[in-house]
């Protein structure tokens, strides 16, 4: 079930409560140029979408708790215009912004500069994200400057310009039941695509042929498409963390790492990584490293529970990886010292996960001052340890040289995990990862 207007209205109510007496200006996304006069497919700003559900470019939302009832939620949108709709498609216009999206008042976007100072007058502060919205920022600053200039005469001026991000992102960090349902749907489609990819992958195909199978399934299932640039990396390409060329031949004897997830029509995302042998059989070195990453990943997933932190999850994975690498002879020394010195980072150089939601790398703090944020029910994070054995990074002093038989092996295993009242729910468990399930 899609996120409906009543859910966006509930979110606005919570945002109004958090704002106090400050007014907020939240712009939507603009169209982005791909090349010449061709534009990328439109992707709405996630903060704007979270509060409005309005999916057209160039819109601006005002949240005005200092105004009377019936004037507190104002949208500026592109008006209905037959000639524009012939070229670019249907617009809701001002009437639709009120009738379909719950705005108290809607104006044409072209009137923002004229009307903004009046709407902001009397607010105790202005919440606006500086540095992200070049078309709107000068209008906000000009309105605020006008208030400051007139304050000696009127006694009225917004006390300050603050970022709305902490308030909004605190709301977005904890997913409501309907959001978890959408994330489960994104996980289902993404997991199915990974299973299809494993069925078709074989030596002699190109990486992008496997990518095509994955992304075709996304579209067939009604998703917008990939949530991010799909990574389909055979052999040593898997040691490049954000590899997206996806144009190499799949070779007999190599592993294939696939990091791919879909984005739904309302922007909730899946994010799964699986690694498997292209020819259906692990070599000895591949299996040893794969089983180590899997053990680290399963231990880290098990650590997801209320009261734990993302840092706890990360350190759980690191401890298992370092112990295993010591046993395999790829590291030397004592575990705690290796971790403290970061002497494992030529083999595992990233964090073990991130928040997931409307953004793939979703918003929300991981720590506040000296304290790491405790996991709570409704939070969703990825758990994705890996190992990447190559010559790209130097071996730290005191650590053993890497034997050739290990080089070119890149492995990552990633699941999307929701924190529940009593532990966690693995949303992406349908994408298989046990070694016996990956071999044929």
Image: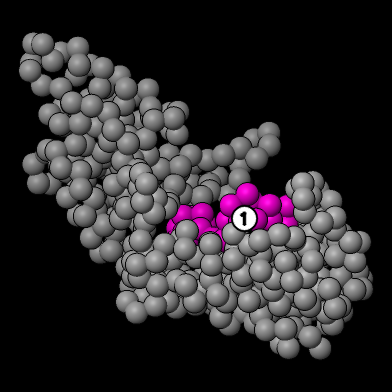
- Which residue is drawn at the image coordinates 74% and 71% (left, top)? 327
Tell me: residue 251, above or below residue 88.
below
Location of residue 379 by image quarter: bottom left
- Which residue is drawn at the image coordinates 15% and 32% (left, top)? 123
Crowding around mark 1 (Cα neighbors within 10 Å: few <14, some 14 to 19, many 20+) is few
Residue 260: x %, y % from top left: 64, 65
In the image, 214 versus 191, the foreground residue is: 191
In the image, 59 versus 260, the foreground residue is: 260
Colouring rule applied to residues: one colour
Tell me: residue 134, above or below residue 30.
above
Tell me: residue 97, above or below residue 213.
above
Q: In which quarter of the image is the C terminus?
A: bottom right
Asked if residue 19 lies left or right of residue 155, the reply is right
- Which residue is drawn at the image coordinates 89% and 61% (left, top)? 403
Residue 426: x %, y % from top left: 49, 77
Q: Specify the segment rendered in magenta.
A: 338-362
Q: In which quarter of the image is the N terminus?
A: bottom left
Q: Is the magenta stretch mostly helix, strand or loop?
A: loop
Location of residue 156 by image quarter: top left
Q: Mark 1 points at which residue?
A: 337
Residue 122 visible: yes
Residue 368: x %, y % from top left: 35, 47
- Which residue is drawn at the image coordinates 36% and 75% (left, top)? 420
In this figure, what is the number of numbered marks?
A: 1
In the image, 152 versus 52, the foreground residue is: 152
Residue 264 visible: no
Residue 170: x %, y % from top left: 32, 53
Q: Is mark 1 on a helix, strand or loop?
A: helix
Q: Is 194 a magenta residue?
A: no
Asked if residue 298 lies left or right of residue 257, the reply is left
């Amino acid at each position: 079930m899609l996120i409906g207007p009543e859910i966006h209205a509930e979110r606005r109510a919570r945002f109004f409560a958090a704002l106090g007496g400050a007014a907020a200006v939240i712009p939507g996304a603009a169209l982005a140029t791909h090349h010449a006069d061709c534009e990328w497919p439109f992707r709405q700003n996630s903060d704007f979408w979270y509060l409005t559900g309005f999916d057209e470019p160039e819109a601006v939302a005002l949240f005005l708790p200092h105004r009377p009832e019936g004037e507190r939620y104002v949208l500026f949108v592109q008006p209905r215009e037959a000639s524009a709709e012939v070229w670019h498609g249907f617009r809701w216009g001002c009437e639709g912004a009120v009738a379909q999206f719950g705005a108290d008042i809607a104006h044409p976007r072209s009137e923002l500069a004229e009307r903004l100072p009046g709407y902001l007058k009397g607010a105790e502060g202005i919440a606006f994200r500086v540095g992200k919205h070049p078309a709107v920022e000068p209008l906000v600053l000009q309105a605020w400057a006008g208030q400051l200039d007139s304050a000696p005469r009127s006694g009225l001026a917004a006390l300050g310009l603050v970022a709305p991000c902490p308030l909004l992102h605190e709301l977005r960090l904890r997913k409501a039941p309907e959001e978890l349902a959408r994330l489960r749907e994104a996980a289902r489609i993404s997991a199915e695509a990974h299973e299809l990819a494993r069925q078709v992958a074989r030596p002699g195909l190109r990486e992008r042929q496997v990518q095509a199978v994955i992304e075709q399934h996304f579209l067939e299932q009604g998703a917008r498409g990939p949530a991010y640039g799909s990574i389909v990396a055979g052999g040593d390409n898997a040691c490049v963390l954000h590899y997206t060329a996806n144009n190499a031949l799949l070779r007999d004897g190599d592993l294939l790492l696939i990091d791919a997830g879909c984005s739904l029509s309302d922007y909730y995302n899946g994010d799964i990584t699986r690694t498997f042998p292209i020819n259906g059989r692990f070599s000895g070195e591949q299996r040893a490293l794969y089983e180590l990453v899997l053990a680290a990943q399963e231990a880290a997933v098990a650590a997801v529970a209320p009261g734990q932190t993302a840092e706890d999850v990360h350190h759980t994975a690191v401890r298992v990886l370092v112990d295993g690498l010591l046993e395999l002879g790829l590291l030397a020394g004592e575990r705690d010292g290796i971790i403290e010195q970061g002497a494992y980072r030529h083999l595992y150089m990233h964090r073990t996960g991130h928040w997931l939601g409307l953004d793939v790398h979703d918003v929300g703090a991981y720590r506040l001052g000296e304290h790491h944020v405790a996991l709570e029910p409704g939070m969703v994070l990825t758990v994705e340890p890996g190992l990447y054995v190559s010559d790209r990074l130097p071996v730290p002093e005191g650590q053993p040289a890497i034997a050739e038989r290990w080089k070119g092996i890149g492995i990552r295993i990633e699941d999307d995990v929701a924190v529940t009242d009593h532990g966690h729910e693995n949303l992406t468990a349908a994408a298989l990862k046990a070694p016996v399930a990956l071999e044929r």
